Image (cartoon, rainbow, N blue to C red):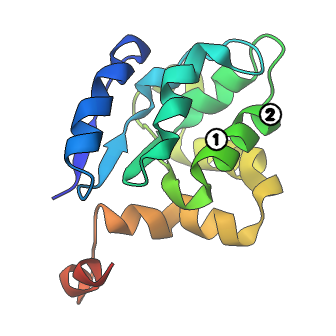
Amino acid sequence: IPVVVAAQLVDVPSLVTPLERFGGVLVFLEHYWGNQLGDPPYERIAPVLELARFPNLYLRIVSNSSYAAREGAGSPHAFFSLLAERFGTDRLVWGSNYPGHWDKHGSVGERLTLAREDLAFLGDAAAKKIFGETALRFWPSGPGALSARKAT
């Protein structure tokens, strides 16, 4: 059973012990840690970046991530490049976060367009993972989904 964790940045270091102890459990870290990123090289989110050593930890990125990456001296390219370098594109999962902040971040379609633009530099193979394939490890669907999940 995958575990979804919604943690503020201050709480992220407390994930180390469970990640060490339960290395076979898929852990999905929600986006809350990344609402304020700071400037590159993004030292503010060092606790999250340090968790990249755990291959069972995945990150959810949302429109909040795209907007946060545009603040200060940062950019979506700089931020998402860092995440892809540390975690690999197969451990990043996009989510709409809709209807959260609907008045600020727009419709699901607008959020998807923004994310596709921000992540386009990673290429088509990465986009397939980020926008669908990786999420199926957590939320399998369709005929044979459970047997396919057991095989991974």
Task: Answer yes or no: is residue 58 visible.
Answer: yes
Say few, some or many: other residues with alpha carbon within 10 Å of mark 1 (under 14 / 14 to 19 / 20 or more).
Answer: some
Q: Which residue is mark 1?
A: 83
Task: Answer yes or no: is residue 106 visible.
Answer: no
Where is residue 58? Give x, y as percent. 43, 48
- 58 or 112, nearer to the observer: 58
Query: Could you tell me which quadrant the N terminus lies in?
Result: bottom left
Q: Kindly identify the amino acid type of the residue bearing the numbered disc 2.
A: Ala
Q: Which residue is mark 2?
A: 78
Residue at the spot 74% in from the left edge and 14% down from the top edge? 71
Residue at the spot 37% in from the left edge and 21% down from the top edge? 13
Q: Is residue 74 above or below residue 65?
A: above
Residue at the spot 68% in from the left edge and 72% down from the top edge? 125
13 to the left or right of 75? left
Q: Kindly identify the amino acid type of the residue bearing the numbered disc 1.
A: Leu
Q: Is residue 58 above or below residue 105?
A: below
Where is residue 20? Give x, y as percent. 28, 42
- 55 or 104, nearer to the observer: 55
Q: Is residue 37 above or below residue 59?
A: above
Whichever of callouts 2 and 1 sits on the residue coming sooner in the sequence is 2
